[in-house]
Amino acid sequence: MSTEFSQAITIGSDLTVNRLGYGAMQLTGLKVWGEYPDREGGIELLKAVLEIGYNYIDTADTYGPFTNEQLIHDALHPYPEGLVIVSKGGLVRGGPEYEDRDAVGNRIYLRQAAFTSARRLGVDAIDLYYLHTPEAKDVPFEQQIETLAELKAEGVIKHIGLSNISAEQLGAAQRITEIDIVTAHYNIYVRDNAPLLRAAIEAGIPFSPWHPAALPKDDSVARFLNVLEPIAQKHEVSVPQLALSWQLHRYDKMLPIPGTTSIEHARGNFAALTVRLADDEVAAITNLVPEQ
Ligand SMILES: NC(=O)c1ccc[n+]([C@@H]2O[C@H](COP(=O)([O-])OP(=O)(O)OC[C@H]3O[C@@H](n4cnc5c(N)ncnc54)[C@H](OP(=O)(O)O)[C@@H]3O)[C@@H](O)[C@H]2O)c1
């Protein structure tokens, strides 16, 4: 069995959270636009998420836009001690079509984004704030990092994270300021961000995979299930729980953020923290897709 396995993780030097976070993005309207149609159900779900044991919630100003942060505030404020709510800025939507979006990185825009996220969340300082994407073209990436460093120095944000960056961009950002976590698309079948995971491991900082338990939606899923189902049966867990457990076993600072609109799924996903896989089981899943 793998021996090193912790259920908690510390981000920076002071933010200690359970190693499974809740991704709140689904609590919006169709195509991540507008209000979540079942407001009372969304509030109930968010309260249940805390009761289950999650103490890390991932949101962004662009989810809605704004409605996701507002719903979290309305459901959970005043926040209990130890709850970490993470937000992101830099992505903008041009309307209800999901593909109609762009990135903005200039200082005034990112400052407005961080200040208004803090206001919507009802906090003086955001515990952890991500640059949502490095894709903004209005100013160089380095200037965007400098703006985050300025916001941190002023106390508007307490920790800086970077989302959807490359390993090279992590290095460039670390030469400017302290980066405490990265997040990217990474799961059993999407491994494009393996170089970023390796860079995070080398830097000793947490890696928060999004869509962490996803599998292919086409016929190619059979090849994955052939390996996953026998291991899941052996451990008496579901395939999504196994997928999350695999993530947790890959790196002791892995912080998956599965999203769900179901209390039952939220409970099941969190229970992945208690699953212990053998090294050869982890390797069998890892080896399903080559990593660069
Ligand atoms: N940084 C970025 O650019 C970025 C991009 C995308 C997402 N994210 C973050 O990552 C989070 C996760 O992504 P996501 O919200 O798209 O969710 P996800 O984790 O990829 O999965 C969502 C889907 O999986 C289903 N699901 C969840 N748990 C399940 C379970 N135990 N059994 C069966 N089905 C299950 C959900 O359906 P039910 O609702 O029915 O459970 C939903 O259809 C987001 O909430 C967001 O915070 C970040």
Image (spheres, rainbow, N blue to C red):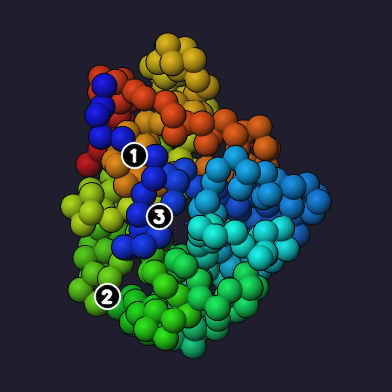
Residue furthest toward the front? 81
Q: CA distance from mark 3 to mark 1?
A: 12 Å
What is the x, y in percent for residue 248? 36, 37
The quadrant of the picture showing ligand 1 is top right
> From what the image shows, is residue 141 above or below residue 70?
below
- Label 3 or label 2, whichever comes before in sequence order: 3
Res. 44 in view: yes
Mark toward the start of the polypeptide (3 vs 1): 1
* Left-right relation of 67 to 231: right
User: On the rendered image, what quadrant is the C terminus found in?
Assistant: top left
Please, what is the three-letter code of the amino acid marked with disc 1?
Ser
Question: Does any portion of residue 100 appear in the rendered image?
Answer: no
> Which residue shows up at 44% across the image and 29% down it?
274
Q: Which residue is mark 2?
A: 177
- Amino acid type at circle 2 is Thr
- In three-dimensional space, the C-alpha distance between marks 3 and 2, rounded to whole angstroms, equals 21 Å
Q: Assess disc 1: are there few (<14), some (14-19) or many (≥20) residues with their C-alpha within 10 Å of its C-alpha.
A: some
Element type at marker 1? loop
Q: Quadrant of residue 69?
A: bottom right
> Badge 3, how many Cα within 10 Å: few under 14, some, many 20+?
some
The circle drawn on residue 16 is: 3
